[in-house]
Image (spheres, helix red, strand yellow):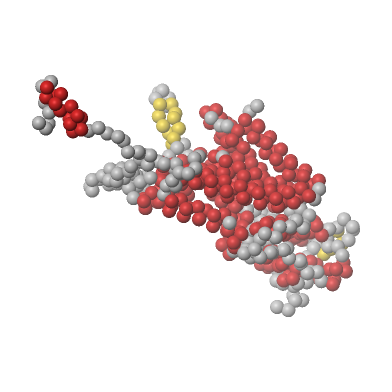
């Protein structure tokens, strides 16, 4: 490559470069530098008192969807509603009656992270929000 | 050593560096999660601009479009407007189709011998199929990743996610593009290794990007379906990068740093390698020129004024001597 030489077809080349830069820097200008820290899911008093969920918090964070999927299969296919975790604690395998009992606000708990990560779980296609919560 | 093994080992070593580093201590997480991605992005953008300006400075002395159809001629001869473009608009149509559909690759042929010993050329579409699967799924995967780089996530990206994830087997739902990307890349890799003629002309720099991209795709699939990663923590790190509030707050699995590091390597690698074909396609004289040299005079840009001595001047110099010698002259 040699320098100090004429740039041919300047108009087209620079138009192309501007388009390239605009596309490649999209996330930078789209967010306009507004910090977006991870949302804090809100724990209810009941959840705080229980201290630990079905599995340790880290495992729940990454694996709750698979746990729920396993639960569903167990309940629907084997009619088994009992789950025992590693501490021997028993749980009723039910999203509406067990999970949402502690985490009673879908909006303040589930949705916060799901919206942040753009996840649309199909749980809510059937399971309505916790009936205890006024719609 | 076999050059594909060399490339494979290079990618494995890079992955191990990131994994061991990120798992061993906290400070390498800042290196792999903040410093290297920023550096890689800068090198990618600067390197690409430099390369493109370099190409833009290279003169194209001749019109050399590859013509794949009848050129513009007499009015009653039908011109092939896309395959032999005469106007700038025709060139644009041809270029768009080339970029999005790889039409020139679609024409790929293979020399074969019939049973009677006759040589003939047969269409060979597998390379085109592999290339289409690979490039399009890579684009979809790339666009899908915008969900980690935008807040709120634009509707079109969410729509793309839904279309891509329409198969729901277990949880999390399956993104087809990720698996199509691995399949496409593995096909292109196997093709290079298995076909002797292609292997003969393949260099380490042909295998390295394939292994690198396969590595990136596999670590991504690993994180999503198997080892699992704290997705919210991962997005927080990436959002920190694009909003210039870099931070490493969450404790994230080392696989995430391997993924990010390999992507950084890919970004740095692009401007200095054959992967620049993504910019180079627009600078291909065989594709970006209109075949109009019968109508327009194109002057070689490096032509310089040539010093000439015409016959008139020659005769002026030697007229008397020519007359003496009995040679015919134009002016008496």
User: At which x and y percent is residue B261?
Assistant: 69, 46
Asked whether, in this view, residue B98 is left or right of residue A63, the answer is left
B264 or B213, which lies in front? B264
Residue B122 at x, y = what percent? 43, 34
B235 relative to B66, above or below? below
- Left or right for B84, reference B169: left
Q: Which quarter of the picture shows residue B61?
A: top left
Residue B31 located left or right of residue A24: right
Residue drawn at 85 percent across, 71 percent down? A46
- Given the current orientation, which residue lies at the most extreme right position? A88
Q: Which residue in the rendered view is the most extreme toward the front? A: B320
The residue depicted at 41 percent of the width and 32 percent of the height is B121
Residue A47 % position (x, y): 84, 68
Q: Residue furthest bottom?
A: A134
Residue occupying image coordinates x 67% and y 57%: B241
* Nearer to us in this view, A68 or A81: A68
Is residue B223 visible in the rendered image? The answer is: no
State whether residue B284 appears in this view.
Answer: yes
Quarter of the image for the C terminus of chain B: give it.
Answer: top left
- How many numbered badges does the structure rendering display? 0
B324 or A112, nearer to the observer: B324
Given residues B88 and A110, the one toward you in this image is B88
Seen at 65% across and 58% down, the residue is B242
Q: Quadrant of residue B6?
A: top right
Residue B42 position, x and y percent, is 62, 50
State the quadrant of the N terminus of chain B: top right
């Amino acid at each position: 490559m040699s320098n100090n030489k004429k740039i041919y077809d300047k108009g087209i080349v620079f138009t192309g470069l501007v388009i390239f830069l605009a596309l490649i820097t999209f996330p930078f200008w789209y967010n306009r530098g507004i910090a977006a820290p991870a949302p804090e899911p809100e724990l209810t008093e009941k959840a705080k008192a229980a201290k630990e969920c079905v599995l340790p918090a880290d495992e729940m964070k990454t694996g709750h969807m698979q746990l729920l999927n396993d639960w569903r299969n167990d309940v629907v296919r084997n009619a088994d509603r009992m789950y025992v975790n590693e501490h021997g604690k028993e749980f009723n395998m039910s999203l509406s009656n067990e999970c949402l009992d502690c985490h009673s606000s879908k909006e303040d708990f589930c949705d916060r992270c799901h919206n942040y990560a753009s996840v649309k779980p199909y749980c809510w296609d059937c399971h309505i929000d916790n009936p205890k919560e006024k719609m | 050593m076999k050059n594909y093994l060399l490339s494979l080992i290079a990618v494995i070593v890079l992955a191990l560096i990131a994994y061991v580093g990120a798992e061993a201590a906290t400070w390498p997480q800042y290196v792999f999660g903040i410093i290297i991605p920023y550096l890689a992005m800068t090198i990618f953008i600067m390197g690409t601009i430099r390369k493109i300006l370099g190409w833009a400075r290279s003169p194209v002395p001749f019109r050399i479009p590859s013509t794949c159809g009848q050129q513009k001629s007499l009015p009653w001869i039908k011109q092939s407007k896309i395959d032999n473009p005469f106007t700038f608009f025709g060139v644009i149509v041809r270029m768009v189709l080339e970029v999005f559909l790889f039409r020139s690759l679609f024409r790929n042929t293979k020399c074969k011998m019939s049973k009677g010993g006759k040589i003939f050329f047969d269409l060979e579409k597998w390379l085109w199929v592999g290339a289409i699967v690979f490039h399009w799924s890579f684009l979809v995967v790339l666009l899908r990743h915008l969900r980690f780089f935008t807040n709120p996530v634009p509707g079109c990206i969410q729509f793309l996610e839904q279309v891509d994830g329409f198969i729901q087997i277990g949880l999390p739902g399956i993104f087809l593009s990720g698996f199509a990307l691995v399949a496409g890349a593995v096909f292109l890799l196997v093709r290079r290794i298995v076909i002797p003629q292609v292997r003969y002309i393949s260099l380490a720099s042909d295998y390295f990007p394939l292994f690198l991209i396969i590595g990136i795709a596999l670590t991504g699939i690993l994180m999503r379906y198997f080892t699992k990663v704290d997705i919210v923590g991962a997005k927080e790190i990436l959002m920190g990068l694009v909003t210039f509030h870099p931070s490493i707050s969450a404790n994230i699995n080392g696989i995430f740093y391997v993924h990010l590091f390999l992507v950084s390597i890919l970004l740095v690698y692009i401007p200095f390698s054959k992967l620049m074909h993504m910019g180079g396609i627009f600078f291909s004289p065989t594709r970006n020129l209109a075949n109009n040299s019968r109508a327009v005079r194109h002057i070689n840009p490096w032509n310089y004024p040539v010093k000439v001595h015409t016959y008139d001047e020659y005769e002026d110099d030697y007229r008397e001597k020519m007359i003496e010698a009995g040679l015919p002259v134009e002016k008496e």
